[in-house]
Image (cartoon, rainbow, N blue to C red):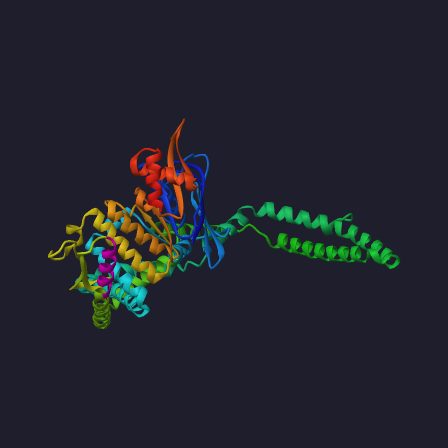
Amino acid sequence: MLKSLLIKNFILIEEAFLEFTEGFNVLCGETGAGKSIIIKAIDCVLGAKISKETILNKEKPTLIEATFIINKEETVISREINTQSKFRLNGILSNLEEIKEKREQLVDIHSQHQTYTYMSPKNHIILLDDYVSKKSPEFKEILKTYKETYFEFKETEKKLNFLKENFQNNQREIEFLSFQLKELDDAEIKTNEEEEIKKELNVLVNAQELKEKTYGAYWALYGDNQNIIEGLSKIKYEISNCATLDKNLTNSQETLFDALENLKDCASYLRDYSSNLEFNPEQLNELNERLSLIQKLKRKYGENLEEERKNIEKKLKNLTNSENNIESIEKNYNILLNSLNLLSNKLNEYRNKNAKELSEKIVEQLKNLQLSEAKFEILINKTSKKENGEDNVEFLISTNKNQTPSPLAKIASGGEISRVMLAMKTIFANIDKVPTVIFDEIDTGISGITSNAVSNSLIKLSKTTQIICISHQAIICAKADNFIWISKTHNENTSIKIKILNKEEKLKALAQLASGQINDDTVEFAKTLVN
């Protein structure tokens, strides 16, 4: 469950800290007070896309931190937004994929946008598949395999069509690619050769200075009568004698010995380096010509010549073997097509079997939501191959007696759609056991007896799942275990104030929601709602 939420510098919130409880939590307040900002913050910390305009004060970062209780242990997810987004999981930097994976285990956020998105028939197959997948891991695996096979099939189809259409026109491209490949092969460019040439050129250009300075260093170390190595040898001799008298000087003796040997090696290397270093005009010429060739090829083919050579070779190979490829790809195409047919038939069987069951469960839930005459059907028709099978799925509903079920988007009112979504979320929540379900105004378009039915449904669901709900309905808010009041203040700047109400404050808030005013009569009415 979601235990708490810390918000700093987000949209209209300077800083706010909310605590949630098990059961039924409600976010309430006047229209436009900013309740949806809280849901947006939860969505944001769990990986939703967000713009920099959400930062209230551009000079400070935005911070959102959500604490969840999972198996009696706390899990803290935070997101800091400034020049970029940083996610942390229990204080450790995390990535978006990991956070989204956590989100699926923690929270299901149902927004108004999602409600109207689900009205579109193209999303009905997603909802049905979601239901079947939660019940049947085998279906989920078949669907995954189908999608992978489908994308491979489409790619194969595309490749096959391309080869067939372009087979006659490939010869000219083969000649051109062959020329390019020969040009690169003849050049025999080695990995990092340009850098090595530049290093060699740098040494050649500065050969005289390098020769003089390295020999000068050798002479100072080992050349003249007062050289460093001779002086160090005398010091080593003296300290060696002292070490026989005091063992504490043994380490110093060994250090001097190592230093002397290292300096001798260094002097020897510098002498040889200086002796062997000569300015070679011919070599300088060759290196400059080689560098010019490499840079010319890079201008022509790009910075990574090795990678480009591989690409050219790959293209040439594909084109050269195109006739054989066509035969091979055609064979693979037919194998994939047969696999898709088998998999899509299995998907169709699962969907038909579970569509009836889901329809019956939705009807049962709708009856509890004051739609006693509702009929709900899931129509499945065969269609062309798509990424999720060959089935076209559409939800049909009728809400009145003797009415033939018709497409959801054409028949259902706003209030009816809200109840269909609540029915489905209730069914899904009971299957997948997501610990927290968030509803952003699930009570849109309903009132009176229907509001009471919706509140009863939410209360029932809250016995097994933490519910966080935005609502304007006093009847629904009255049943909340945790009542959070959101209000907007207008001082120098507009901001949002958040307060968790006690019992007395809750009654006053309900009175205001129900009638628009707070007096003894409206407070008494609020008490009847609570009771």
Task: State the image coordinates of residue 242 (x, y, percent, origin top left).
Answer: 86, 55
Closest to the observer, 103 or 488: 488
Task: Specify start and end residues of the magenta stretch as a single range.
Answer: 357-369
Quarter of the image that includes the N terminus? bottom left
Task: State the image coordinates of residue 282 (x, y, percent, origin top left).
Answer: 49, 52
Q: In this view, does 161 lie above or below 86?
A: below
Closest to the observer, 44 or 250: 44
Q: What count of labels does the image hold?
A: 0
Is residue 359 one of those drawn in magenta?
yes
> Residue at 85% across / 54% down in the picture?
238
Residue 128, quarter of picture: bottom left
Q: Is residue 141 left or right of residue 188?
A: left
Chief secondary structure of the magenta span?
Answer: helix
> Residue at 38% across / 46% down in the picture?
44
Question: Residue extending furthest right?
Answer: 245
Q: Is residue 445 above or below residue 153?
A: above
Closest to the observer, 69 or 484: 484
> Residue at 42% across / 58% down in the picture?
189
Task: State the image coordinates of residue 279 (x, y, percent, origin top left).
Answer: 55, 50
Task: State the image coordinates of residue 25 (x, y, percent, origin top left).
Answer: 38, 48
Is residue 403 one of those drawn in magenta?
no
> Residue at 71% across / 56% down in the picture?
264
Closest to the observer, 80 or 159: 80
Q: Is residue 431 left or right of residue 238?
A: left
Q: Is residue 514 above or below residue 123?
A: above
- Residue 65 appears in the picture as rendered: no
Q: Is residue 61 left or right of residue 213?
A: left
- Residue 309 appears in the picture as rendered: yes
